[in-house]
Image (cartoon, helix red, strand yellow):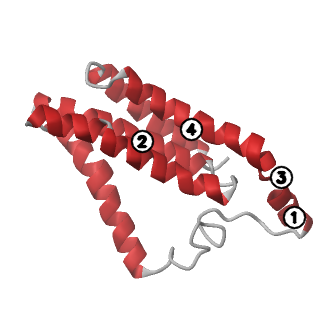
Amino acid sequence: MEFLVPCLLMTMLGYFLVSRYGNAVTTTDLTFSVGYLAYIYVANVVCFDSNKLQLSQREKNNIPLEPMGKDSLGRGQFITKSSFKIYFGISKIISFLIPLVLIFAGPSDVAVMVTPSLIIVLAQFVGEQSTGSFHDVLRVLVPIGYVSYNLFGPVTSWARDSW
């Protein structure tokens, strides 16, 4: 449940951005943002039985779940490395902070173009934070799905409209 506060904050930021620049965010963007995460949740229940086997084994052996440590997708091998920290910091700046600054401080044309991509990044953040106890296959699919949609959806539209 420790992921609840960051998820709520990102959802509120997303709602604010949609209310401010709603004409730039398509119904498809919003549908994908919510629908893909719903698909991941349903797949976890249907295909992996809510990951009950792994979680019950951990509980039986009294092993706590550490989604940002030993139970991360890299099994904790990369999360403490300086190169990963640099990569993670730069990716946050490029995908989150720069678009956020452009939305609030940049020209309105730029804000309108950047908003859909930022909404997808916020949805990805919520998806990654809320699926920490899911099966690894689904946890890997969260960033792949959102980045793929962002690349072939809002970013493609942005490039086409800019041309």
Q: Residues within 10 Å of mark 3 (few under 14, many from 20)?
A: some
**Residue 51 visible here:** yes
Distance from Cα at disc 4 to Cα at disc 3: 19 Å
Q: Please count the marks in the image.
A: 4
Q: Which mark is residue 52?
A: 3
Occupied quadrant, residue 18: top left
Q: Earlier in the sequence, mark 4 or mark 1?
A: 4
Residues at discs 2 and 3 in contact (Cβ within 8 Å): no
SS class, disc 1: helix
Q: Amino acid at mark 1?
A: Gln
Distance from Cα at disc 2 to Cα at disc 4: 12 Å
Distance from Cα at disc 2 to Cα at disc 3: 28 Å
Q: Amino acid at mark 2?
A: Leu
- The residue under label 1 is 57
Q: Earlier in the sequence, mark 3 or mark 1?
A: 3
Out of 88 and 36, give the one closest to the viewer: 36
- The residue under label 2 is 122
Q: Amino acid at mark 4?
A: Leu
Question: Where residue 53 sits: x, y (%)?
Answer: 85, 57
Q: Earlier in the sequence, mark 2 or mark 4?
A: 4
Q: Is residue 163 left or right of residue 159?
A: left
Question: Where residue 111 sits: x, y (%)?
Answer: 19, 33
Out of 94 and 141, give the one closest to the viewer: 141
- The residue under label 4 is 37
